[in-house]
Image (cartoon, rainbow, N blue to C red):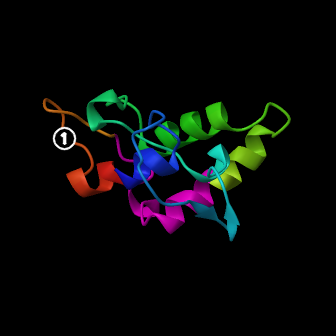
Amino acid sequence: SLISVAAGLTEKGDVQDGKILANGSEGRVPKRLVGVVWQDDLLLSNLTVYEVVFFAARLKTPSSITNSQVDELVKVTLQELGLIDVADSTIGDGRRRGISGGERKR
């Protein structure tokens, strides 16, 4: 898929033709610009949306970035994804009600 190509998850030879432009420059998309969530069953169902995004952000940011800075980044991201209203809701799973499928995919 396009996301797999952009995230650099394809093998050599998988893509036959084309080029990727990131912010006007040709080449691989920097990892800080692309994140992939494989399947919703890999999300920790007992955590809140905020906690899951914070955890992912903490893993993707350098250790020189403070938790306070990550917190601000998470809040901006949740706002951009339209998830700020469900930030304190649990993810949920087949046994426990949580956020909607559309929210989960975002």
User: Between residues 47 and 24, which one lies in front from this camera angle?
Assistant: 24
* 56 horizontally vs 98: left or right: right
Percent x, y of residue 14: 39, 40
Q: In the displayed image of the protein, which residue is found farthest to the right?
A: 64
Residue 20 is covered by the magenta coloring: no
In the picture, the quarter occupied by the C terminus is bottom left
Does residue 17 lie above or below 93 as drawn? below
Residue 37 sits in which quadrant? top left
- The residue positioned 80% from the left and 30% from the top of the image is 63
* 9 horizontally vs 32: left or right: left
Q: Which residues are magenta?
A: 74-90
Residue 49 sits in which quadrant? top left
- The residue positioned 42% from the left and 51% from the top of the image is 3
Residue 54 seen: yes
- The residue positioned 47% from the left and 37% from the top of the image is 9
Residue 102 sits in which quadrant? bottom left
Percent x, y of residue 5: 46, 48
Q: In the displayed image of the protein, which residue is found farthest to the bottom?
A: 24
Percent x, y of residue 7: 51, 45
* 7 horizontally vs 4: left or right: right
Q: Which residue is mark 1?
A: 97
Does residue 16 lie above or below 22 as drawn? above
Does residue 10 lie above or below 24 as drawn? above
Give the crowd class for mark 1: few <14, some 14-19, many >=20 residues within 10 Å. Answer: few
Residue 76 is covered by the magenta coloring: yes
